[in-house]
Image: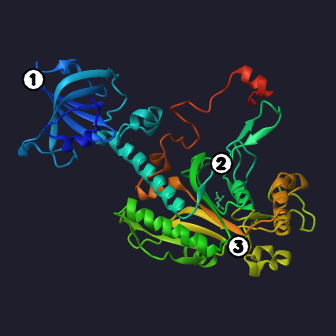
Amino acid sequence: MQRIWATETPQRVGERVTVAGFVHSRRDHGKLVFIDLRDRSGILQIVFRAGQTEGADPEELRGEWIIAVEGEVRARPESLVNPHIETGGVELLGAHLTVLSRAETPPFDISDENAMRNVDEELRLRYRYLDLRRPSVRERLRMRHETVAFIRRFLTERGFWEIETPILSKSTPEGARDYVVPSRLQPGSFYALPQSPQQYKQLLMVAGVERYFQIARCFRDEDTRGDRQPEFTQLDIEMAFVEQEDILRLTEELFTALIREQFPDKHILHSPWPRLDHEDVMKRYGSDRPDLREHPEDPNELAFAWILNFPLFEAEPEDAPDSVSVAGLPPGKRYAPSHHMFTAPRPEDVVKLEENPSAVRSLQHDVVLNGYEVGGGSIRIHDSELQKKIFHLIGFTPEQEDQFAHFLTAFRYGVPPHGGIAPGLDRLLMILLGQPNLREVIAFPKTGDGRDLMMDAPAPVEEAQLKELGIRIQPKPTG
Ligand code: ASP
């Protein structure tokens, strides 16, 4: 008999059905054994009457065993209805029990949400597949899926194409260190995992794709600080023949529709989102990601805002240790892009690039939400001379500039004006789902120091693998 989900049983009263899932809990009342069966959809009460069940013995069942049960769906008497669960009006009278898999006692009690609060997070992460069995954690996976599904529909309807870009790539600087992957076929050469698909999405605009998006994995090797993940997901978007206004409008429409449909309890405080000037915000709040909520204690209030008119550069300190001397710039002087090196200056400020780069404002746009930066983007430079000038100002050596030769070459063949944005999906979901950290919205997250406790990664590799790659590990310096 075809298996149905627990939550389908209320529509099947009087029918004989098969359900399957985990033993969530078990209560033994002598002649009756009650099982709460948990499957992905929810929980269903099953009653076994002593001596009236075929197959395995219900008394032997233990927590987390996996079973299939055939039986009749019955309406519960009024007094026994449980209004707290979706299947609370029915139960299954077990007629045939099959044990599909036995389970050892798990290291924590999956069915006890209260007790879970005191369980060490490292233990949860080590046994993440068990942690994910918990209805509350699983619900977050579902919401994440629904969110991504919504985004895909929304953007597809507006003419965007979802395009995958490579993971094995070349350094795409976003201000962090790269994760590098040694190449076996080109010994001594390395791929870099993308810090974002920035160059690819811009090259897709050169390719004439016009509207691109991707649910993109990004990799940044950063020191442990704050709530970060070495790999994270962003909704990467790029559009051609647009102005900043178009990008702001699209983002605002997308988030507003998403929240209305998927998170109806939340309300957006200011609509349209306030647009704040970077300089003003810094003066007023001392931060470029102010929390604009009126009732911060209200978990349903969402205060979005745009931060605009960022300076194009953050001047690096004169004594920056890796400062190089750049022809035409005072010794040791160079400028770090405040967003990234492809961001366009405001057209009216381009003249200042010569004599006063620090005063140049850019076409960067950041989205902030409840005190977090949840996305950033910009209108891009689409002129190779201007791009070269920026490379120069940030102090690229000829070798570093060489790293971007492909980009500048591409720009020789015509570049539509373009721009984009990349909201961070993990962070957005963390806020919308009211979670204290990013790990709670990622299926298999890493610890603050970048370890995957379940897989035990990173881990040493076999000597033979290293040899193939032509890599020798230096012993750690002692003392
Ligand atoms: N690549 C940028 C980032 O990851 C976003 C963008 O400019 O579209 O922050």
Compared to 302, does 476 lie above or below?
A: above
Q: Are marks 2 and 1 in contact (CB under 8 Å)?
A: no
Compared across the picture, whether 263 is left or right of 49 comes to right
**Residue type, label 3:** Ser
Q: Quadrant of the N terminus?
A: top left
Compared to 70, does 44 lie above or below?
A: below
Q: Quadrant of residue 397?
A: bottom right
Q: Which mark is residue 220?
A: 2
Which residue is the site of mark 3?
362
What x and y, as percent, mark residue 442?
A: 49, 45
Label 3 to label 2: alpha-carbon separation: 24 Å
Q: Quadrant of ligand 1?
A: bottom right
- The answer to whether residue 367 of the structure is visible from this angle is yes
What x and y, as percent, mark residue 194?
A: 69, 48
Label 1 to label 3: alpha-carbon separation: 74 Å
- The answer to whether residue 316 of the structure is visible from this angle is no
**Residue type, label 1:** Gly
Q: Quadrant of residue 269?
A: bottom left
Q: Quadrant of the C terminus?
A: top right
**Residue appearing at x 49%, y 65% in the figure:** 254
| Label 3 beta carbon within 8 A of ligand 1 | no
**Residue appearing at x 70%, y 73% in the figure:** 362
Within-10-Å neighbours for mark 3: few <14, some 14–19, many 20+: many
Compared across the picture, whether 471 is left or right of 420 comes to right
Which residue is the site of mark 1?
30
Q: Nearer the viewer, residue 183 or 409?
A: 409
Q: Nearer the viewer, residue 83 or 398?
A: 83
Label 2 to label 1: alpha-carbon separation: 58 Å
What x and y, as percent, mark residue 14?
A: 13, 37
**Residue appearing at x 45%, y 70% in the figure:** 303
Compared across the picture, whether 416 is left or right of 150 comes to right
Within-10-Å neighbours for mark 2: few <14, some 14–19, many 20+: many
